[in-house]
Amino acid sequence: ALCGCLCPLRMYAPMEGLLTALLVVFGMAVAFASIPRITWEHKEVQLVHFHEPNIYNYSALLLSEDTDTLYIGAREAVFAVNALNISQKQHEVYWKVSEDKQAKCAEKGKSKQTECLNYIRVLQPLSATALYVCGTNAFQPVCDHLNLTSFEFLGKNEDGKGRCPFDPAHSYTSIMVDGELYSGTSYNFLGSEPIISRNSSHSPLRTEYAIPWLNEPSFVFADVIRKSSDSTDGEDDKVYFFFTEVSVEYEFMFRVLLPRIARVCKGDQGGLRTLQKKWTSFLKARLICSRQDSGLVFNVLRDVFVLRAPGLDPVFYGLFTPQLNNVGLSAVCAYDLSTVEEVFSQGKYMQSATVEQSHTKWVRYNGPVPTPRPGACIDREVRAANYTSSLNLPDKTLQFVKDHPLMDDSVTPIDNRPKLVKKDVNYTQIVVDRTQALDGTIYDVMFISTDRGVLHKAVNLESDVHIIEETQLFQGPEPVQTLLLSSKKGKRFIYAGSNLGVVQVPLAFCGEHSTCADCVLARDPYCAWSRQTDACVTLQETEDPSSQLIQEMSGDVSSCPDKTKESCRQHFFKYGSTVELKCFQKSNLAQVFWKFQNSVLKVESPKYGLVDGKNLLIFNLSEGDSGVYLCLSEEQVRNKMVSRVVAKHVLEVKHILPRPELPTLPAVQTEGSWIVPKVLAASIPGSPPPTPAVEVSSPRAVTPAPRPVTPAPRPTPTSMSCETKIVINTAPHPLPEKTMYLSSSDNRLLMSLFLLFFVFFLCLFLYNCYQGYLPGHCLKFRSALLFGKKKPKSDCCDREQSLKETLVEPGSFSQQNGEQPKPAQDTGYETEQDTITSKVPTDREDSQRIDDLSARDRPFDVKCELKFADSDADGD
Ligand SMILES: *[C@@H]1O[C@H](CO)[C@@H](O)[C@H](O)[C@H]1NC(C)=O
Ligand SMILES: *[C@@H]1O[C@H](CO)[C@@H](O)[C@H](O)[C@H]1NC(C)=O
Ligand SMILES: *[C@@H]1O[C@H](CO)[C@@H](O)[C@H](O)[C@H]1NC(C)=O
């Protein structure tokens, strides 16, 4: 059976690679792009949203850069919003399906609630004052003009057949070129007749309805490439269509899909007799996107973006997946326009040949090609030969192009390999921006959305791909269906449409990087550190002179200004409790480790633990834990390891005997017995030098001086600015309930509880065994007891079970190393700090300190001078 599956493969060499990708790619040594360096949760960054209640499927976006207006086509509605703040709606118009149309649609077996509605599919500029809009209109596609002044439909009621699909689930693409709509979609109710057409009053054209022209295509994108202004050969504007279709050239057990690029000439008028009202310039070719070294072939096209920049020939960026994508693979390939044009203007054609009576095979055509060249646009040379229009092209040429629309040569990507290959993600849409870094280097930044509402931002740095960041665009995992990039100078955005709404995203989140090192290590060509403002700024928006900016795309942080004053956070905790020390490290690529008294902590030990891979937990605090804790991060940047101190905590553990007046304080008896004696906190930093530290680090700490309770003068702002929190343990009694069972003196209670459970469990086990609920040895044991009345049947089943597990294993492949690392969010674990913050008495005198506390999530917000002797570890 295996041979039956693999043997035909040998016959078609190009198929081999294709199939490798179709089959599951296990254990392949492919350099996939690594995970995004930074994850922005939905709430973490500021995004602007637009959605209207009870309106869904925001699938069509159109940006008018002149008026800063974004037009949004949704289900049964079109909106105009402010492009600079899409939450500001300017106009709206509804376009509902009439009752009888809906009833007719439902009669044909379509769903009244989901399908028999008007989905806007075409939203194109018609003139300065009107848009051309088409909708599915309950399986009776219709087009209309939308007046932008009154924001009302003119009621033209044009037949939308061939411009807009009947079924909202069918693929479509369209582009307005000089007032004529070029579209690729299906022409009938069933969606079985594909068409690429031009809607034009004087010369409507369409494709032949024939398999060699279009074979079950799934349309992805269309755009016009204008002839270059300095052209001398009188060339024509060309419209390119991108789609995936069932291949005719590869035959296999199942339908092999292939990505295609097709093009037609704007000046095409159709043939006079042959190809009447049909394209005479329709040619298509295969797009190649594969990794030769690994045999990975990406043969399903998902989206295309045309990158245009001054002084640059347009570049086509294509987003691909393999046909069977159970492991979530995606790739981006880029194609030069010149490569594409060469294939169409000089490439070989394919020809169908009949083998064994009825079977046809597509092979390279090596015979003579008629002149003018079939499928070529009418240019100066053709005109010189007296062919001024496609209408007077010779029949020979027209017949040839009718039979040979497919090129044998394929379009190969730039550098002959993908720009990016990513695992564990299904990309849906792509836009690309060309930007200039501070040093003048040009970068093409790719913004790619996923089927789970995430936007990746990737850039090629030297030979490898760096995914700068990922942003969760929506609250839930919504598939992103449309991406649009504004190209105007100034404040620029990406607009993403989904079923539930539209979101506006800036190109960079530079302001989120709070230190120079963070800003530089992001390696984001849009961001630079400003010495002037001491902030990470967006390069295109800043006024700062470039001499005051730091940007190192190599990730070299050495030019960052030294932090003269070490920032730190200082805590006081009670004896025997657990503490979580935070480390604000956004990079998913960095390795975090902790140092205490200059030695690296082993976090697997029972004493320590890590939360989210970065915050340190210290259990069962004792005096020995007082001291300086450093959170260090190590990150591989190119071939270098960059390590730096991310956070510094000074910890002091207090062990204070109960004092008679303490229990009368209201705070003492609260849950967890936190005492937050503000007087005490204030007094320590303000008190004369080093006594408190000595107290703590020495055994004498058990009997501290009563001094702190006396009201002390308000501390100076500098000493206050470090987050000082004191928690006193009124040890040895009364212990708070939640820690009671863990203290050694109460082990007896724990033991008896444990014994009780053990006996209970044993009883349960014996009973179940007796009843025969438990398999395996237990049954053997039981049957031995019951004189072998029943035979244990477990062995075979056990093996089956393990077999199942082995089979399941490959599936887990797609889950491991997920592209969306778990949010570095609150784990619900309430830290001591949290508790304290909420319980600090609101004394006016100390309100400032409370403010400081609430700002604790930014470790570098405050600077402090260490006033304790136990912090002397910090000196080195
Ligand atoms: C329209 O949006 C709804 C709501 O999210 C979704 O269930 C449906 O699949 C969408 N329909 C199409 C055709 O996109
Ligand atoms: C083009 O047509 C003109 C006039 O009909 C004729 O004189 C000329 O020879 C033709 N040129 C070619 C290249 O056929
Ligand atoms: C990608 O899509 C495929 C098919 O829809 C699905 O099986 C797979 O789980 C998806 N992978 C990811 C990472 O979303």
Image (cartoon, rainbow, N blue to C red):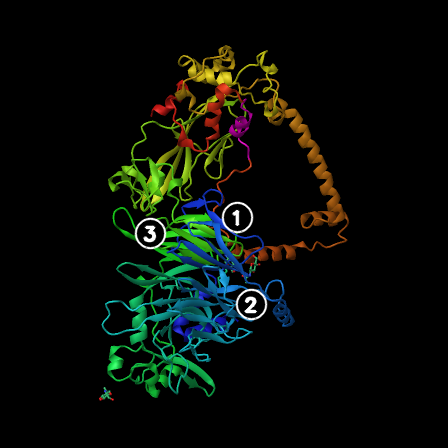
- Is tag 3's residue or tag 2's residue first in the polypeptide sequence? 2
Q: Crowding near pointer 2: few (<14 within 10 Å), some, many (20+)?
A: many
Residue nearest the observer in this picture, 713 or 664 = 713
Circle 3 or circle 1, nearest the eye: 3
Q: Crowding near pointer 3: few (<14 within 10 Å), some, many (20+)?
A: few
Asked if ligand 1 lies within 8 A of label 2, the reply is no
Q: In terms of secondary structure, where does tag 1 sit?
A: loop
Residue 598, visible in the rendered structure: yes
Q: Is residue 257 left or right of residue 443?
A: right
Q: Amino acid at mark 1?
A: Gln
Task: Tell me the magenta residue range.
Answer: 829-841
Circle 2 or circle 1, nearest the eye: 2
Q: Is residue 166 magenta?
A: no
Residue 32, visible in the rendered structure: no
Residue 234 at x, y = what percent? Answer: 26, 74
Asked if labels 1 and 3 touch by Cβ distance under 8 angstroms, the answer is no
**Mark on residue 475?**
1
Q: In terms of secondary structure, where does tag 3 sit?
A: loop
3D distance between C-alphas at marks 3 and 2: 38 Å
Residue 710 at x, y = what percent? Answer: 50, 11
Q: Crowding near pointer 1: few (<14 within 10 Å), some, many (20+)?
A: few
Q: Quadrant of residue 548?
A: top left
Q: Is residue 830 magenta?
A: yes
- Is tag 3's residue or tag 1's residue first in the polypeptide sequence? 1
3D distance between C-alphas at marks 3 and 1: 30 Å
Q: Amino acid at mark 3?
A: Lys
Residue nearest the observer in this picture, 531 or 557 = 531
3D distance between C-alphas at marks 2 and 1: 30 Å
Please tell me which residue is depicted at 62% across the width and 62% down the height of the picture: 113
**Residue beneath label 2, please?**
137
**Residue beneath label 3, please?**
489
Q: Quadrant of residue 182?
A: bottom left
